[in-house]
Image: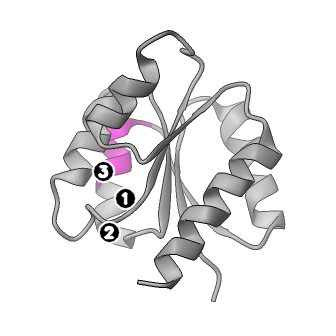
Amino acid sequence: MSKRILLVEDNEMNRDMLKRRLERKGYEVIVAVDGQQGVEVARSVIPDLILMDMSLPIVDGWSATTQIKELSQLNHIPIIALTAHAMAGDREKAMEAGCDDYDTKPIEFKRLLEKIKNFLQQGDHS
């Protein structure tokens, strides 16, 4: 059974590219275009992992992550923050919001894929 990844990304080009590349690796990818939709989709599909852009419309990635981690049925799901804001303190801010890891944009696909695999393998042993 393929692992389900929720990709929360408002930039259409980034979203399409990442979705296609992940699907080629055998993942099922569900997309949301803003933080509010991300929280709603996470609730309804309960993905195996979430890729969360931090700069989102309506509800930003930090708030959406906090909301997801507050829900008992979702708080076990690993969330990897994706952000172009590679500023000092951003990693800490993402971790404080509840993200389990952090990756910078532009996405280095091979590195991100390793992080995804590591989280999903951990989940298989629990």
Nearer to us in this view, 64 or 58: 64
Q: Is residue 32 above or below residue 75?
A: above
As drawn, which residue projects farthest toward the bottom? Answer: 1
Q: Is residue 21 above or below residue 82?
A: below
Mark 2 and mark 1 residues within 8 Å of each other at the beta carbon: yes
Q: Is residue 110 left or right of residue 16?
A: right
How many residues crowd around disc 2 within 10 Å: few (fewer than 14), some, or many (20 or more)? few
Whether the magenta-drawn stretch holds residue 120 is answered as no
Q: Amino acid at mark 2?
A: Ser
Q: Would you say the magenta stretch is mainly helix, strand or loop?
A: helix
Which residue is depicted at the point 70% across and 34% down?
14
Where residue 5 sits in the image (x, y, percent)? 55, 62
Which residue is depicted at the point 37% across and 70% down?
46
Where residue 102 sits in the image (x, y, percent)? 52, 36
Secondary structure at badge 1 equals helix
Split into 4 quadrants, where in the image is the N terminus? bottom right
Q: Amino acid at mark 1?
A: Val
Secondary structure at badge 3 equals helix
Nearer to us in this view, 71 or 14: 71
Which residue is depicted at the point 64% across and 53% down?
115
Picture quadrant of residue 55: top left
Give the magenta-colored segment's residue range. 34-39
Q: Which residue is mark 2?
A: 44
Q: Which residue is mark 1?
A: 41
Q: Is residue 31 left or right of residue 113?
A: left
Mark sitting on residue 39? 3
